[in-house]
Amino acid sequence: MQVESGAVADADSFPQERLTRRIFRDETLLVLGLSLGASGVSALISFVGSVTKPGGLKDQAATMNASAAPGRPWLDLAWQLFGIATALVPVVLVAHFLMRERESLRTLGFDRTRPWPDLARGAGVAAVIGSFGIAFYLAARGLGANLTVVPEALPDVWWKYPVLILSAVQNAVLEEVIVVGYLLRRLGQLGWTPGTALVASAVLRGSYHLYQGIGGFLGNLAMGVVFVWLYRRWGRVGPLVVAHSLLDIGAFVGYALLAGRVGWLPTA
C-alpha cells in the first residue's frame, strides 16, 4: 500500500505540460483530421465525381443513413449503432484536450445547466433555418446546382426511427462542439481574428456538405455564419446542438414519412 501511495504522489507531482501554440495547432489538426476535416476532403472527392459524371447533378442522389446490411436487420442495427458511437469519439478527444487546460465541455456551453433556455432558443433557430433551408434546397436543385438528397434509406423495421433520431443528435453534437465551440476557441488561442475564425468555421461546415452539391455547400456556409454569430452572442453551443438536432430529425424522419406521398419532395 505504501508503494502504491508513493506512486500516486509521484504522478500527481509530475509537472504539467506547457501548452504552446504549436500544441494547440497540432491537436486541432488531429481533431479535424479524425473528423470533419476528413469529411470535407471526402465530400470534395465525391463532388468532383458527381460533376464529372454524365448527366446533371439533380439526376444523381446523395444518400444518408443507408442500410449497412440489407436483409439482415439485427446486423444492420449493430452497424448503425457502431457508426453513431464511433462518430462521437472526436468529441471525447476534444473533452480530453480541454481537460489539459483544466477546462471541460462546459467551457463551450455543452452541459445541462440551462436546459430550458437552450431548448427554447434551439427550437426557434430550427424553425427559422428549417423554413429557409427547404426552400433553398428546392431552388438549388431546380437550378441544377444540387444533387437529390435522400436523407434516409433504412428498411422499415422497428428501430428505424430511433436510429434516425440518434443519428441526428450525433451529427449535431459532433458538428457544433467541434466546428463552433472547439474550433473557435483554438483559433482564438492561435491568434486568429474573430472574422477570420468565423470564415474558417463556416467554410469548414460548408465543405463537408459539398457532396450534396453547390447548394449544400452554400446553404451550410450561410448556416455556419449564423451559428458562429449566435454562439458568440449566447456563449453556448447547447442551443446550437438543439437546433441542429431538430433540423436533422425533421429532415430524416420527415423524409421517411413524406417521400412518395407529397409531390413537392424530390426522391431518387
Image (spheres, grey):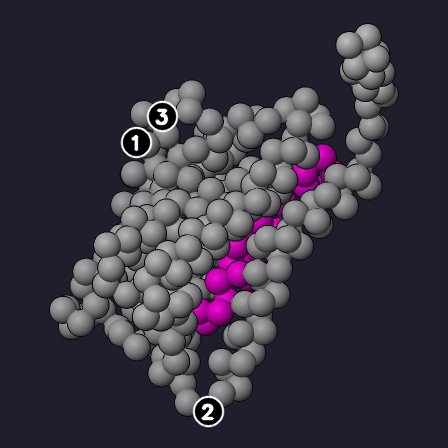
Name the residue at 45% across, 71% down: 213
Q: Residues within 10 Å of mark 3 (few under 14, many from 20)?
A: few
Q: Quadrant of residue 135?
A: bottom left
Between marks 3 and 1, how big is the CA–CA gap? 9 Å
Residue 250 sits inside the magenta stretch: no
Residue range in magenta is: 186-215
Kindly identify which residue carries mark 2: 54
State the mark number for residue 120.
1
Mark found first going from the N terminus, 2 or 1: 2
Name the residue at 18% across, 72% down: 260
Between marks 3 and 2, how big is the CA–CA gap? 49 Å
Q: Of all residues shown, which one is farthest toward the front?
A: 1
Residue 207 sits inside the magenta stretch: yes
State the mark number for residue 115.
3
From this view, report whether residue 57 is shown above or below residue 221.
below
Q: Which x, y percent locates residue 120? A: 30, 31
Between marks 2 and 1, how big is the CA–CA gap? 46 Å
Residue 222 at least partly seen: no
In the displayed structure image, the side of residue 27 where residue 70 appears, left or right = left
Q: Secondary structure at mark 1?
A: helix
Which residue type carries mark 3?
Pro
Q: Quadrant of residue 190?
A: top right
Predominant SS along the magenta part: helix
Residue closer to the observer: 181 or 91: 91
Q: Which x, y percent locates residue 94? A: 62, 38
In the displayed structure image, the side of residue 84 where residue 151 appears, left or right = left
Q: Which x, y percent locates residue 85? A: 49, 47
Q: Which x, y percent locates residue 70? A: 35, 70
